[in-house]
Image (tube, coloured by chain):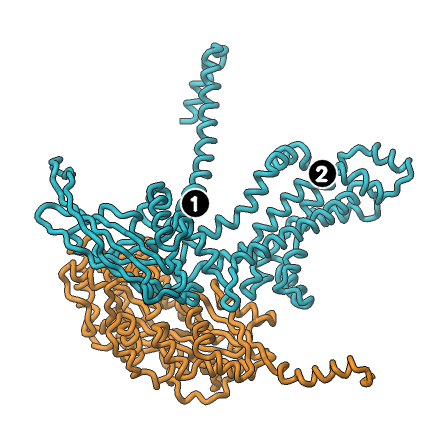
Chain colours: A orange, B cyan
Amino acid sequence: MLFRPAKALAVAIMLLGLPALADETVRISGWGGSEVAIVNGLLTNVLAEKLAKEGITVKYEPVDGDFSQFIINGLSAGTAPDLFYVDVFWARSIFSAGQAAPVTQDVSGFSANLLEAFTYDGKLYAIPKDFNTLAVHFNKDIFDDAGVAYPSDDDTWTTLQEKLVAVHTALPEVDGLCIVPEYARFGAFALSTGWSPFDRQGKTVLDERFRRAFDFYTGLVKSGAAVMAADAGQSWTGGCLASERAAIAIEGAWIISALRDSAPNMNLGTVRMPKDPESGKRGNIVFTVGWAVNAASKVSRAAAKVAALLTTEEAQQWVLEQGLALPSRTGLADNPWLRGGQPEQMTSRVVLEGLSDDHVTPYFFGDVGGSWMQPINAALNSVILGEADADTALASAQSAFDRMLAK
Amino acid sequence: MMARLTAAEAVPSRRRLPASALRRRQLAVSAWLYLTFLAVATILAGTFVLAFMASLKVDPLERPFRLYFDQLNPAAWIAAARLGQEGAGDALWGGFSPGAKVDFSVTYAAPVGTTIVEPNAEIPRRRPGSGIAAALMRDYAADYASIALKSSSSAVMQVRDEETGVWEEWQTRTFVYEITYRTDRRNGPWIERTPLNLTAPPSQTLIDSPISPSRSERRGRLLSWDNITPGALGLIFNNYRRVIKETADLQTGKSLFGSWLVNSLAIAIGRLVLTLVVASLAGYALARLDFRGSRLLFAALLFSMTIPAQVTFVSNYLIFRDLSLLNTPWSVIVVFVASANVLLMKQFFEGFPREIEEAAIVDGANRFQVFLKIVVPNAKPALLVNAILAFQGAWNDFFWPLVLITSPPEALTVQVGLLSLRRSYGGAQGDWGLVLAGAFISIVPVVILFVLFQRHIVSTQVTKGIT
């Protein structure tokens, strides 16, 4: 058969073509919003040459909508991308199901507490790509107009509350803060008292320290320092800041990209979370996202290579200098860009400093997952709305925790 | 209360009401009925109109909701057309291209005693914060434009004090800015938007500008325009343009919204054809062919109408996965339940005169020929109703496309694509202008269908539908 010239040619082409067949296509996916600019920018501006040299073609598919649902569906149906985002918040369910491949590369350059968040059963399953903590973002113009001193790094809960009440008194159309009844914001206050979500026995105990933070947070509305975000027509604290309805917002560095669209010229200031007046300590929550390789991927080696490239120091420096996200590598913590005076540089610096607050825990809740927050959120909501008093609400939250963690 | 009323009414009912009173009562009842219908129609049409108005706005969520804004103001359209013409020689879609020379005048007013200062004007480097727009934005007007004050003039105006009712004399000042494409960057690109910031003390108020500022920031200190060279259509349909342009595939730069529309159309037509074939064949068989188990089959068909799609979707999903049809339009085309359509066709065929068919059989036609040559050509009204219902159902279907087609982004249907227009920051805020504009584009095919076939939908459903 091989004497036929056409066939011989075809075989020769196939043989010659083999190196080209080694060209692997890696599908990667993450959520949309401001992330699209980060990943696309990295792929086209920073890594294009390196990827070509490795013979890897990357197909990037951002998902706007519910990403965790997308990825869990995809993983169970076998249609998931080769490399995808995992949020520490729900990563555990993917790791425990064996759907992510363990990381084999050297990870010594990454921040240890971020690595810890992605470690399950002693193995690391995702490379942290960036992180966020909470900070107080404020509109300087509102404080100027109200004649109130700006929030500062030395503020305690009480001094911050006094400033917010003063702003609302001077400018009745402006509220101090739009609060949300969510652990994701309130938690930073509770943690600063030294309270911890899980005690040594793995139980959640809503003790007096928790109660103190709870009373402060739920009392913000009554004192005139805050309003419920929903009552101001917003669903997050940043929405009110952008519309100049509120003087401050408690958010992470993600607020920068939201402000670019809705309030590009805001005279923004950022300071660290206020201290607990009794303990004098600060608390914070770390939100982090990592890249995980699909355990069922046919190109897992190439996918791991892409993950490594996307988190190199060079890549993270580019992301940082574009003001897009904070690096998960400790080597970039004293990058000169962070010392600049632009609002986004300042915000990034403060959010980065949040990582070294006194009581910092990652935004994840062991095997219970996100439903752990439900009793606290329900208690916050019912007390702020005046549906229940703190005693009743916390007693029912405590019994919900006892049932949840009884196993 | 009720008892008393009936008792009171019971007395006059013994004798007949005078004809005029009866007539009045009838009139009153019909008037109320008419008003109720009118109110319901107004509410339904009203929400539609308001949603359309909101889809044109810069901020669809603005409170209070304004009914009169630049996008509905012919004077602003003309000004936008002039600005677009000066910016890029395109009065319709505007832009900023080499050779541009744009005159933009703003007038401030202030009470006597306050001096009006020249605002600080700047073409800012405005970078989209999120979404594909942020990834695709390459050229910024800030790098290519220069702005200079061309002239300024003063005048006075009469202002009536709201509280005292006294007329006061206010001074006004008009500043004319000239924005030019920098001559040292002659070969620069065409840029879609030219933003502008004007910073002035809050003591002076902007009273006139060719197009209104997109937003007032910094508690009135800063007025900011997203685009001062929009062109008339670019001003009115800015959100619509963004839907098309900002949903682009990152690799190819092609508009995703366009491919979503094509996908939806292909799926709707595929489902329509399949529905017509299956529904007419099955409907005819159930109506005319007396085969064993036909009653059981019909009962099963009726029963299948009561099962919600959500009950069977896991098993259907797994079947499609094993057939490797996931993420293809075929899965959404074949996953349909035509029992309602079959029922519709069966009822129609049962009402079809048997004698005509028998005449054809006498002439030597077989069953299939009778069906194809006699019955189907006479079943046009029923087929049309079925076709319209099937198309509309497939076009508006959300559940199956959401489950069966998840990636790549260009494979989605338009209804699922709309969901992905909700960009999220911290999981909360959405770009509602895009969502609304996308929703309005997505209803266009169904509206066209309705307008074209409205007569058939109304008449045939009433007269020839399920009897």
| Residue at point 68%, 34% (across, down) | B464
Label placed on residue B380: 2
Q: Is residue B114 visible?
A: yes
Q: Disc 1 vs disc 2: Cβ atoms closer than 8 Å? A: no
Label placed on residue A329: none
Q: Is residue A383 visible?
A: no
Q: Secondary structure at mark 2?
A: helix
> For residue B166, which quarter of the picture?
top left
Picture quarter with the N terminus of chain A: bottom right
Residue B430: x, y in percent?
Answer: 40, 58
| Residue at point 48%, 84% (across, down) | A121
Residue B355: x, y in percent?
Answer: 84, 32
In the rendered picture of this protein, how many numbered marks are placed on residues?
Answer: 2
Residue B342: x, y in percent?
Answer: 71, 45
Q: Amino acid at mark 1?
A: Phe
Q: Nearer the viewer, residue A202 or A110?
A: A110
Which chain does the residue under circle 2 lie in?
Answer: B
Q: Secondary structure at mark 1?
A: helix
Within 10 Å of the Cα at label 1, are there few (<14), some (14-19), or many (20+) other Cα atoms?
some
Identify residue for label 1.
Answer: B52
| Residue at point 16%, 58% (across, down) | A145
Left of A19 or right of it: where is B112? left
Q: Nearer the viewer, residue A14 or A112?
A: A14
Left of B113 or right of it: where is A10? right
Residue B43: x, y in percent?
Answer: 43, 38
> For residue B68, which quarter of the picture?
top left
Which chain does the residue under circle 1 lie in?
Answer: B
Within 10 Å of the Cα at label 2, are there few (<14), some (14-19), or many (20+) other Cα atoms?
few
Mark toward the start of the polypeptide (1 vs 2): 1
Q: Amino acid at mark 2?
A: Lys
| Residue at point 39%, 65% (across, down) | B187
Q: Nearer the viewer, residue A330 or A312?
A: A312
